[in-house]
Amino acid sequence: MGKGVMKFGGKSGLLPKPKEIFKQPYKHQVYKKQTDLGYAEGILHPKKITRDYIPPKVSTPEQLLKRSAHEPVKKFTEEEIAKMPINQQFKVKNAQMRREYLKDSYEKEVERLEKLEKHAELLKLDEEKLAQEAAKHTQSKAEFFTSPTLESYLNGPLVRPRTPEEQETLRIKRESNRLQTRLNVDTQRAASLFELYNASINFAITEEKLEKLVDAAFDSKADEAWNNVASSTPNKISAVKNHVTFDNALVDIVLDNVNKGPGYEAVEDYLNGFTDDIKELAEQIKREKNLQDIEAANENLNKVAEMKRTDV
Amino acid sequence: MLALTGIISTVYRTTTATSTMSLVKLANVCAHLQNVSMAKAPLASIPYTRLHLQIAFGLYKEGFISSLQRGSQNGPDITPVEVTPDNVSTRRLWLGMKYRQGMPVLSKFQLISKPNRRVYAEAEDLRSFASGNRFRFVKPLMPGEIVFVRPKGAKEVINLHEAVKKQVAGELLCRVY
């Protein structure tokens, strides 16, 4: 970063603004004095100040060319140039080239400026058109009379109350939710009831059953294996009889059993006829499979008989 | 969902009774607008209630805010939305904050009457207060300061000077400068 970079916002490598090729206007324009500018009639103006606007001097490209790049008085032919020393040849050609380039640049600049002018005119026309349309626009009566004002908000209710239809919809929705919740609770209670019912098989409800259970609980043979657990090997422990095996648990899950008896879902399936349908389907599949097995066995027998015949 | 709609309807019932509404929410709004001003945020949102709408409209009329729009929690409404009991909980008022030369126009916004210390004034007291005197513990008005008053028995919220012109008694709600 150089010394004078800070005045360009700390950025180096910034190009300078391009200079204008035409310092003065390049074509004549009709100057129209604006009514709301300058000194009014009868009002004195200070000394050394012009009362009216002096338009800048116009320099057309032709004038500029004539002034700074006019054609040479004597025009050399190619033969004459060829006879000249090399330095002079270069000077003549260089001057010719500069004249051409300057002329080109003026032409292109004029072209560019005219393009810009045309574009600005189009923009101005568009703006005028938009302004005219906006001036024509009037607020419709419907808009004027129906747009709510802040006062109307403050005077009226802030929240629109529910319509009878909305109230009815809400009531139905609430009723539906209530019934659904009730159904879930009842289902849960029914499932718990089945669980309790199935578990009650093991309850001691008579004196005989109680005695039987007490005997079973204090049976020394049953506890023998457990008492020796501490001194047992893993093989011995695994050999201890376990009432709830993995298979039984799996069967319970598949059949929706709870406490070794049918659970709520199993009963519901039975009452719905779902269990019967499943049974019927299973039997049908079994029958079909039997038939297929018989057919396969017959085919095999036939093959064996055929093989025997061919051997003979 | 059902419980929520129940709460909404309860809120609606309580907000409609403006005269008995607690000033706690207004205190929150005052603090929020002060904070927003200090943070130089362009927009501030406050709950959509009648009292807040009245106060915001008063701020707008006095030139403390540049715009007042209805909207939801997500921002100001692009198209008008009807306020129903189902969407009232998400409705907000959006205020356009004003700044001049990098300084907030609204620099102080405080409650005068508080939930546990209500300040009611008679018409004569209001006139005295408006003319630059102290009223009870309430400090005198500073130049350019605005006080919002709720006239006795009315739902509207008006400027102190309007209240003096109308010669009404009322509750001094808040002061802004």
Image: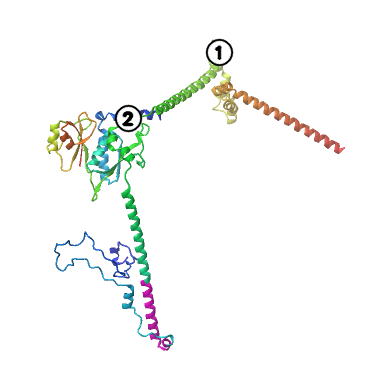
Depicted A77 relative to depicted B29: above or below:
below
Q: Main secondary structure of the magenta part?
A: helix
Hey, which residue is sitting farthest right in the picture? A312
Contact (Cβ within 8 Å) of mark 1 with mark 2: no
Q: Nearer the viewer, residue A32 or A237?
A: A32
Which quadrant of the structure image shows residue A88? bottom left
Which chain letter goes with mark 2?
B
Depicted B31 relative to depicted B18: above or below:
below
Q: Secondary structure at mark 1?
A: helix
Q: Secondary structure at mark 2?
A: helix
Q: Is residue A83 magenta?
A: yes
Which quadrant of the structure image shows residue A17? bottom left
Q: Which residues are magenta?
A: A80-106
The residue indicated by pointer 1 is A209
Q: Amino acid at mark 2?
A: Tyr
Left-right relation of B50 to A201: left
Residue for point 78% across, 34% down: A300
Classed neighbour count for the residue bearing mark 1: other residues with Cα under 10 Å, few (<14), some (14–19), many (≥20):
few
Hey, which residue is sitting farthest top in the picture? A207
Whether residue A218 is visible: no
The residue indicated by pointer 2 is B12
